[in-house]
Image (tube, coloured by chain):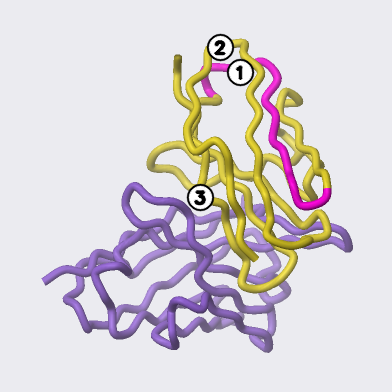
């Protein structure tokens, strides 16, 4: 199963609403997770099951799905949100990651 | 506190071998499916391999073509990845991660800090 992400890079300001899209090459039954990764650190899960917020993750992060298209939204970008975001399908092996979206400061 | 601590990375020549370890504390290791994920310098995340709690189910990325072998020792709460016939393109930070699944979803709820493997002559 192939995952594509768009955009690959985006520049945004603090307070902006940011949307990242992940498309799967076939159905994955909502087995999709979103991770945030900062330089030199391991990834951290934000969303799983396409739309369930991991405990401890701020509510400005949300996920949604429509068929094979998945969206991560950050409502009100904060300085600590500048990072790279990856989607991952966990429906079937081999598990795959999207290529990533880097969110940079505008 | 949950900790996953990788070790065993380092500099190795092309064609060489290396064994990575991941020691887990604070989790029920023997009932946990464990995964390896790698990240080449400046690149994205790449799923490598997985092994079920009892070691009965093992999967690998197609791109590895039999060069890597995953194993575990539940008595030592440890996960391993044997890397053979190493190539420059295997240079990466290798992470171990614990898989958590429910009936409707899965996620990696814990990650190690990573161990760097550099393949160079």
Label annotation for residue A77: 1
Q: Give the range drawn in magenta.
A: A67-80
Residue A79 drawn above or below residue A90: above
Chain identifier, colour yellow: A
Residue A10 vs residue B26: left or right?
left
The location of residue B49, given as percent across then percent down, is 54, 74
The chain letter for the residue carrying disc 1 is: A
Asked if labels 3 and 2 share a chain, the reply is: yes
Secondary-structure class at tag 2: loop
Are dots 1 and 2 in contact, CB under 8 Å?
yes
Label annotation for residue A14: 2
- At 37% from the left and 60% from the top, the residue drawn is B115
Q: Which of marks 3 and 2 is nearer the N terminus?
A: 2
Label annotation for residue A99: 3
Neighbourhood count class around disc 1 (C-alpha, 10 Å): few under 14, some 14–19, many 20 upward: many
Secondary-structure class at tag 1: loop
Q: Which of marks 1 and 2 is nearer the N terminus?
A: 2
Residue B38 vs residue A3: left or right?
left
Residue B1 vs residue A50: left or right?
left
The location of residue A49, given as percent across then percent down, is 80, 50
Q: Quadrant of the C terminus of chain B?
A: bottom left
The chain letter for the residue carrying disc 3 is: A
Q: For the residues carrying marks 3 and 2, which lies nearer the camera in this image?
A: 3
- The residue sitting at the left extreme is B121
Give yes or no for residue A79 being in the magenta stretch.
Answer: yes
Q: For the residues carrying marks 1 and 3, which lies nearer the camera in this image?
A: 3
Neighbourhood count class around disc 3 (C-alpha, 10 Å): few under 14, some 14–19, many 20 upward: many
Residue B59 drawn above or below residue A58: below
- At 67% from the left and 85% from the top, the residue drawn is B57
């Amino acid at each position: 199963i192939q995952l594509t992400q768009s955009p690959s890079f985006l520049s945004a300001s603090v307070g902006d609403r940011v949307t990242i899209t992940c498309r799967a090459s076939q159905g994955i039954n909502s087995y999709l997770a979103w991770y945030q990764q900062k330089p030199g650190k391991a990834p951290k899960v934000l969303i799983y099951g396409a739309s369930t917020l991991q405990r401890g993750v701020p509510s400005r992060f949300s996920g949604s799905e429509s068929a094979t298209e998945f969206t991560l939204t950050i409502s009100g970008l904060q300085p600590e949100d500048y990072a790279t975001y990856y989607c991952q399908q966990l429906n079937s092996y081999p598990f795959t990651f999207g290529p990533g979206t880097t969110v940079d400061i505008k | 506190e949950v900790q996953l601590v990788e070790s065993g990375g380092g500099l190795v020549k092309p064609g060489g071998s290396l064994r990575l370890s991941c020691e887990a504390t604070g989790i029920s290791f023997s009932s946990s499916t464990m995964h390896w994920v790698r990240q080449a310098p400046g690149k994205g995340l790449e799923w490598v391999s997985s092994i079920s709690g009892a070691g009965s189910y093992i999967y690998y990325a197609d791109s590895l073509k039999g060069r890597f072998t995953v194993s575990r020792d539940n008595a030592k709460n440890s996960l391993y990845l044997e890397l053979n016939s190493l190539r420059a393109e295997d240079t990466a930070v290798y992470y171990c991660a614990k898989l958590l699944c429910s009936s409707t979803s899965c996620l990696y709820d814990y990650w190690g800090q990573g161990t760097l493997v550099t393949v160079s002559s």
